[in-house]
Image: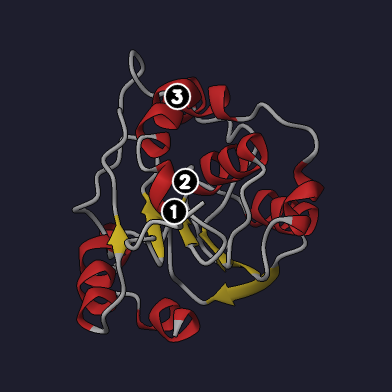
Amino acid sequence: MKTPEKIYDFVIVHGSYGSPFENWFSWLFQKLEAKGFKVLVPQFPCGEENQNYDNWFRVLDSYSSFLGPKTTYIGHSLGPAFITDYLLDKQLKAKGLYFIAPLYQKLHISEFDNVNTPFFIRDDLEKLKELSEKSVCFVSDNDPYVPNAISFDFAKKIGAEIKIVKEAGHFNTAAGYDTFPLLLEQLL
């Protein structure tokens, strides 16, 4: 079977109530594309009516013929939980996983738990180790939404290296993250 010529090098997945145009996503997209990489930053359905694993699965799966073992996945906030579920469900290998402010359990913040909980569907997260060459989790020491313990627990289960970033908040625009040079450096 011939491999499609346009396999994405990178897939960037936003978090709850998110968009591909917020935070550092557009900046990273532009930086990677300028270096000749093929980058996908899809818009996933958001809001209580539409944000669930099945809807997000359909969006990413519509690109499945362009995803392969040389694809690196970058996820912010809820994005890592979705990427984990998707790769495990499809048994899809990845070149790398770069998870920023990751979580795979309730935050005890109702506006987020209502839309995030449908993504916490697996209890075999450690199997992700078999599907990726490298996994890195970026954790802020002052994230107002995702407690460090939640990110550390997730990173441990998937066998990821942990990079603690001082005063990075939730790695979003509110915390000054319209760019993310440390992540770009790690990706390259």
Which residue is drawn at the image coordinates 46% and 72% (left, top)?
167
Which residue is drawn at the image coordinates 26% and 59% (left, top)?
23
Amino acid type at mark 3: Val
Q: Position of residue 130 (x, y in %)?
A: 77, 57
Amino acid type at mark 1: His
Secondary element under disc 2, as helix, strand or loop, is helix
Secondary element under disc 1, as helix, strand or loop, is strand
Q: Identify whether 146 is placed above or below 110.
A: below
Mark 2 → mark 1, Cα distance in angstroms: 5 Å
Q: Identify whether 47 is placed above or below 146.
A: above
Labels 2 and 1 touching (C-beta < 8 A): yes
Q: On residue 142, which mark appears?
A: none
Q: Position of residue 107 (x, y in %)?
A: 58, 36
Task: Give the quadrant of the C terminus.
Answer: bottom left
- What residue did someone put label 1 on? 76
- What residue did someone put label 2 on? 79
Secondary element under disc 3, as helix, strand or loop, is helix
Mark 1 → mark 3, Cα distance in angstroms: 15 Å
- The residue at the far front in this view is 1
Q: Position of residue 185 (x, y in %)?
A: 43, 86
- The residue at the far top in this view is 49
